Image (cartoon, helix red, strand yellow):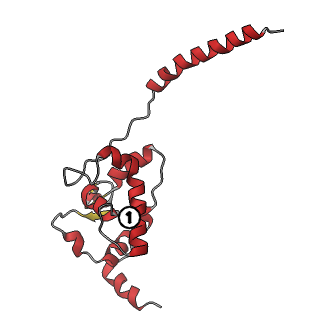
Amino acid sequence: MIHVKSLFGILFAAVIVLSIAAPAAMAESTVPLPSPAKAFKGKQCVEPADVMRREHMNFLKHQRDETVREGIRGNKYSLQQCIDCHATADPKIQNGEVRTLQPFCGACHTYAAVNIDCFACHNPTAPLETSGASKNIEFDKMIAAHLGQGNPDQTSKNAGGAQ
């Protein structure tokens, strides 16, 4: 029969070995940390970077609720604000002819294995021009272009007449 003291000694030794080996194994991780693309414009985000990293999903949810339920648009934490500052040209998307949030959002969300569904409905791209041209594009044309539906002009004409 194994004596209780010797069993305790073996267990204690195992804990010591594991506590030494675990940090060494973590230090040798081959998973690279994310490095999101720099902001397209602006020098300061609406909140400090550490706050945005922790809380951006809560800000966006709260803003979504205000927009959908109360019709309040364009506040501090709107998705459009994110696109205006953080969408950058990505050569893998439409040959780099539009700015997109993929390089910014995708870096951390891929690392954290988090799926974002904002862009199932929202267009994550903006024109390359920064002179306010994105405000002149009609919303239905942006959606048609995002969905890849032929001629955006024709799509918007058909959308109004279809029953």
Q: Residue at x 44, y 34 (%)?
A: 31
Identify whether 139 is placed above or below 124: below
In the rendered image, residue 72, in percent from the top left (x then y), is placed at 34, 72
Residue placed under numbered mark 1 in the picture: 63
Give residue 132's quadrant in the image.
bottom left
In the rendered image, residue 45, in percent from the top left (x then y), is placed at 25, 52
Q: Residues within 10 Å of mark 1 (few under 14, many from 20)?
A: many
Q: Residue at x 80, y 9 (%)?
A: 2
Name the foreground residue: 24 vs 69: 69
- Mark 1: which secondary structure? helix
Identify whether 7 is placed above or below 61: above
Residue 163 at least partly seen: yes
Name the foreground residue: 141 vs 105: 105
Residue 151 at least partly seen: no
Q: Amino acid at mark 1?
A: Gln
Identify whether 136 is placed above or below 116: below
